[in-house]
Image (cartoon, coloured by chain):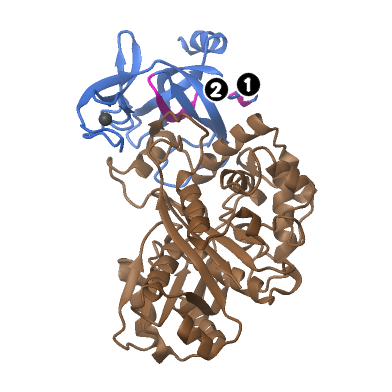
Chain colours: A blue, B brown
Amino acid sequence: MSQRIPVIEGLFAERSDGPRLIGSRCTTCATPYFPKSPVCHNPGCDQSKMEDAAFGPTGVLFSFAVQNYPPPPPAKYDEPYRPYAVGMVDLPEGLRVLGRIATDDFSQLRGGLPVHLIVDRMYHDSEGNEVVTWQFRPAPVLAQADDRRMKP
Amino acid sequence: MTEVAVLGVGMHPFGKFEGKSVGDLCRTAVVAALADAGISWREIEAVAAASSRFSGGKGWGLNGNDVVEDMGSTGVPVYNLSAGCSAGGNALNVGYTLVASGLHDVVLVVGGEKMPKGFIQTSGVEEKTDPEFLRQRCIGVSGPAFWGMLCRRRMEDYGTSEEHLAKIAVKAHANSVHNPYARFRKPFTLEEVLKSPMVCFPLRLYEICPVSDGAAAAILCSARFARRKTSKPVWVASSTVATARFDDGVTRHLAAVSPKGRTMHSEAKIAVEKAFERAGLGPRDLNLVELQDNTVYYELAFPEEWGLCSEGEAERLVEKGETVPTGKLPINPSGGFQSFGEATTAMGVFQVAELTWQLRGEAGGRQVPHARVGLGQTIGLGGNATAVVLKS
Ligand SMILES: [Zn+2]
């Protein structure tokens, strides 16, 4: 039976209060990391002290681009290829995260747009499993409309 | 420190050469550089080479060793440098350092590449610990999409139009018509560029560089050696290597720390500013720039980030045609990566060849009038960058 599986284990979690990115933070200098980092990379930090941290679910779009052509390996996608948007999202935790921007209406995208974290389908693997990844959905008006459409 | 001269340069034309190996391309460039310098292979005391990711080097990036074996093994030391697309610049820097330190009088710097077809597959490994692999597998953000994101933000911040972007590509190809080493030597109209397929909105096919096969070589030597060979040497005023700062806001991994200031490639800015400082020269002294235009966007962002023009001024320079060879700030008179295509690890040496021809006044129809000081710059995966200032 086909399953819903994360694209890579350990990068995000679907919690009861919504999805989160799984990373870490240095308690000395408060620098956030995604994915988890075993040490603090801040050259201004005197003592690396890492603790687990979860990031999201809200952020602000810094910028975006559209992947109009199919990307080369090791990227994967379902056929027929459909262009998607990718973006840099600034989280209030002080982290700028790359991710897909979950919308087909690219014309609405601009810097400063509020977005929220979701986990959604990316491609199907050879066994038919639905491979999911973290994405950012423009919030809130369009998101609600999309949520309704997604329900069976 | 000894003064360092560029005694000779050579290139293999850029393009797609099915029947040739990377060794063939490098040999052509090296032989041309030796002839240009007026010296023999046996006079080369050391070799600094860019490690190719895509071709030759015995699969270990030993491309300098390939060149030495091919030209005739003389026992010279070989340095193979790996720095993504910045490797040619790193090789140049090591060659420069070997001469400047007084260790060697004559050094060969070489970079060559045979690129696979299509868009560059940036990640070479499928490992969960490799950030480039994670970016591609978990998000699917290609190189052009990354440039597109930076460009799109600039369009919002500074009012960059699609015409501005296209105009830079038109300028690049207008220059390439006069460069026998360029791959694409055909002029493009604004309309042709604007009608080219969208690769990663907002960037179109003719606004990003393709990949090419190509090679370039340069002979560096001490002032003492140079004066024996020529009355008009081109000098390396400075050569620098830098890596990125921790907090510049450029997402080289899945995430970065949100920057406090402007988002920019800090590695390139550091390399260029250090190059000016060490040369005792500044933006006002520059007559031309050969910068890494993987995308036309960089021709807008880089000059501002390095202080060659003021913030938001880059689009005005493009509008007024000030970046053409006869303008106030000539950028990429060679035709740039847009016209050559990127033979990744050769590019830092390719820039030195063009700057040398320009400073000698040998650049023909693309000549920058009265060129005396030129800047070259590369940037590569891993947050690598290099800069070089040449002066006549
Ligand atoms: Zn820290």
Task: Give whichever of A114, B370 is nearer the camera.
Answer: B370
Residue occupied by mark 2: A103
Residue A87 falls within the magenta-colored stretch: no
Residue A48 appears left or right of A136: left
Query: Is residue B365 visible from the viewing direction of this image?
Result: yes
Residue at 60 percent of width and 38 percent of height = B151
- Any magenta on residue A98? yes
Find the magenta span and give its range.
A93-106
Q: Which mark is residue A19?
A: none
* Amino acid at circle 1: Gln
B200 shown above or below B354:
above
Query: Label for residue A108?
Result: 1
Q: Is residue B347 above or below residue B208?
A: below
Q: Quadrant of ligand 1?
A: top left
Which quadrant, please, contains the C terminus of chain A? top left
Q: Amino acid at mark 2?
A: Thr
Alpha carbons under labels 2 and 1: distance apart: 9 Å
Q: How many marks?
A: 2
Quarter of the image where one finds residue B234:
bottom right
Is residue B15 visible in this depiction of the protein? no
Classify mark 1: helix, strand or loop. Answer: helix
- Residue B35: x and y, percent? 54, 88
Picture coordinates of residue B389 (x, y %)? 54, 63
Q: Label 2: few (<14), some or many (≥20) within 10 Å?
A: some
Q: Which residue lies at the image location 40% right of the left edge and 65% below the top edge?
A: B52
The reply to whether callout 2 and callout 1 are in contact (CB within 8 Å) is: yes
